[in-house]
């Protein structure tokens, strides 16, 4: 189907850098002439003299292409005037108006359905299409285009926080085909997008299965060793069960101590990541292909980290402790563990990522319920298996070989997922900017009910993720108070 797409017979210059030519019969119009814009001032606070609402926030838009009434939204309050002005309606389009990174400006989401109490939140702009000029779904797809997003990016002002003025949003210019053609374009993109998403979801499920397989292998070997015939004994620990008879079980603080040194003047900023361990923030940006916010103040309050240290981060209760692959500095709210010289660090890097150990760590406190960070006392509450050092090294080498193929397949699958996302983005851009004519292809499509789901599995529910992705203010406040 896609290979049969042709170009439009007649084209003209759009007059927009980055957009190039558009079909002859299309218009190029400013946003103010095709949609009404409302910038919300409704915050997350609840006041007794206001009415209860559900608030559609920045993260809801950032994470989801489509806003649906059944989604879980934050509870808040608003005045009657705010409700009347910012109540969402089916067909509305929301965009992110402010962010800590310029390329997170102008991210759109389409309001598929909404209840009477669902309100547009702060840091968002609500775009309501003018009837007979543009349909909401086409406006949404057009704003997904890299060529259009470029206009938002160059208009964003700021240094540590970027934002769009009302005038800048209204002045954005978009390619506008006739209404009937907009519907054709939307149906074509929806049809192809659904299939790309299904393929991406299948790949994501494969990654999860491979991750489970990797964890099962690690869990078995770090708690039982390499020799399946070795005599066992009771470890005395519920989370550990039986261990080889010649192993010891030791207190955690015998082989790990907290590193209390503050950041050195030339320390690079590090990120504690579940996927890559503790690495420089620049390297993390390169690996994931996106920018994160780097704090510029109070760096001296951060903690110094050496290679092969371990870091207890805000998300260690989910993914274990992170090994440091570079020296530098980390947030002051994190705990840095210095290993004894008499251990094999690689063995413990596998142990700290095993499901059994993570479960034991979770049982040490009520931090999940109360929002408390893990600390050194939590770490010390979990005793550790301790094979002879030579055996620790053999186990680490064996694990590296045992999970090598699994890790390789996971990396290849993740690469395929990223390529699919890039293909999806390019296809949407080419179609909504008139680089390809989909009218004939759309006419041959079967009719079906579309089901849209997020294609990014990003969890913003905790403070660490909110800080890494959406800003550094929380961290700076913490470090000033420390």
Image (tube, rainbow, N blue to C red):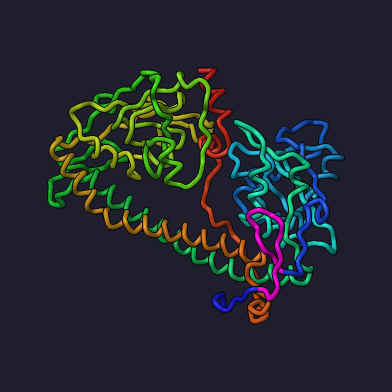
Residue at 64% from the left image edge and 36% from the top image edge: 162
The chief SS type of the magenta part is: loop
The quarter in which the N terminus is drawn is bottom right
Residue at 52% from the left image edge and 25% from the top image edge: 296
In this rendering, is residue 40 above or below 10? above
Please state if 94 lies on the left or on the right of 296 as rendered: right
Give yes or no for residue 388 being in the magenta stretch: no
Percent x, y for residue 159? 61, 31
For this orientation, the residue located farthest to the bottom is 444
Give yes or no for residue 10 being in the magenta stretch: yes
Q: Nearer the viewer, residue 253 or 448?
A: 448
Percent x, y for residue 2? 56, 75
- Asked if residue 267 shows in the view, the reply is yes
Q: How many numbered callouts?
A: 0
Quadrant in the rendering for residue 24: bottom right
Bounds of the magenta segment: 8-23
Please state if 185 lies on the left or on the right of 467 as rendered: right
Q: Nearer the viewer, residue 42 or 166?
A: 166
């Amino acid at each position: 189907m896609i290979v049969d797409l042709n170009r439009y017979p007649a084209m003209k210059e759009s007059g927009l850098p980055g957009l190039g030519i558009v079909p002859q019969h299309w218009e190029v119009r400013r946003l103010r002439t095709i949609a009404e814009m409302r910038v919300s001032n409704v915050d997350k606070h609840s006041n007794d003299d206001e009415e209860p609402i559900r608030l559609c926030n920045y993260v809801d838009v950032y994470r989801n292409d489509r806003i649906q009434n059944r989604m879980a939204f934050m509870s808040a309050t608003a005045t009657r005037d705010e409700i009347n002005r910012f109540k969402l309606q089916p067909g509305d389009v929301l965009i992110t108006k402010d962010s800590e990174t310029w390329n997170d400006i102008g991210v759109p989401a389409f309001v598929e359905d909404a209840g009477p109490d669902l309100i547009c939140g702060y840091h968002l702009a609500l775009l309501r299409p003018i009837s007979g000029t543009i349909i909401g779904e086409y406006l949404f797809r057009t704003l997904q285009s890299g060529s259009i997003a470029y206009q938002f990016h160059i208009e964003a002002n700021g240094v540590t926080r970027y934002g769009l003025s009302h005038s800048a949003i209204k002045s954005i210019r978009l390619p506008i085909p006739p209404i009937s053609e907009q519907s054709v374009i939307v149906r074509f993109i929806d049809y192809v997008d659904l299939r790309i998403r299904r393929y991406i979801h299948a790949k994501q499920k494969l990654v999860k299965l491979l991750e489970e397989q990797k964890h099962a292998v690690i869990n078995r070997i770090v708690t039982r060793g390499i020799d399946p015939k070795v005599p066992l004994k009771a470890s005395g620990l519920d989370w550990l069960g039986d261990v080889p008879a010649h192993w010891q079980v030791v207190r955690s603080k015998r082989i790990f101590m907290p590193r209390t040194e503050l950041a050195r003047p030339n320390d690079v900023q590090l990120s504690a990541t579940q996927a890559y361990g503790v690495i420089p923030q620049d390297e993390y940006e390169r690996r994931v292909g996106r920018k994160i916010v780097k704090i510029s103040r109070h760096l001296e309050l951060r903690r110094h980290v050496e290679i092969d240290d371990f870091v207890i981060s805000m998300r260690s209760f989910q993914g274990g402790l992170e090994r440091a692959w570079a020296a530098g500095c980390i947030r002051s709210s994190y705990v840095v563990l210095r290993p004894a010289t008499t251990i094999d660090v690689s063995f413990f890097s596998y142990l700290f990522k095993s499901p059994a150990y993570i479960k034991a760590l979770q049982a040490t406190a009520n931090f999940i319920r109360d929002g408390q960070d893990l600390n050194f006392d939590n770490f010390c509450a979990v005793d550790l298996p301790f094979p002879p050092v030579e055996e620790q090294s053999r186990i680490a080498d064996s694990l590296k070989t045992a999970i090598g193929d699994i890790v390789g397949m996971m990396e290849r699958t993740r690469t395929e997922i990223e390529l699919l996302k890039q293909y999806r983005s390019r296809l949407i851009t080419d179609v909504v900017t008139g680089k390809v004519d989909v009218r004939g292809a759309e006419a041959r499509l079967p009719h079906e009910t579309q089901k849209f789901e997020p294609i990014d599995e990003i969890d913003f529910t905790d403070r660490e993720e909110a800080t890494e992705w959406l800003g550094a203010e929380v961290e700076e406040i913490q470090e000033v108070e420390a």
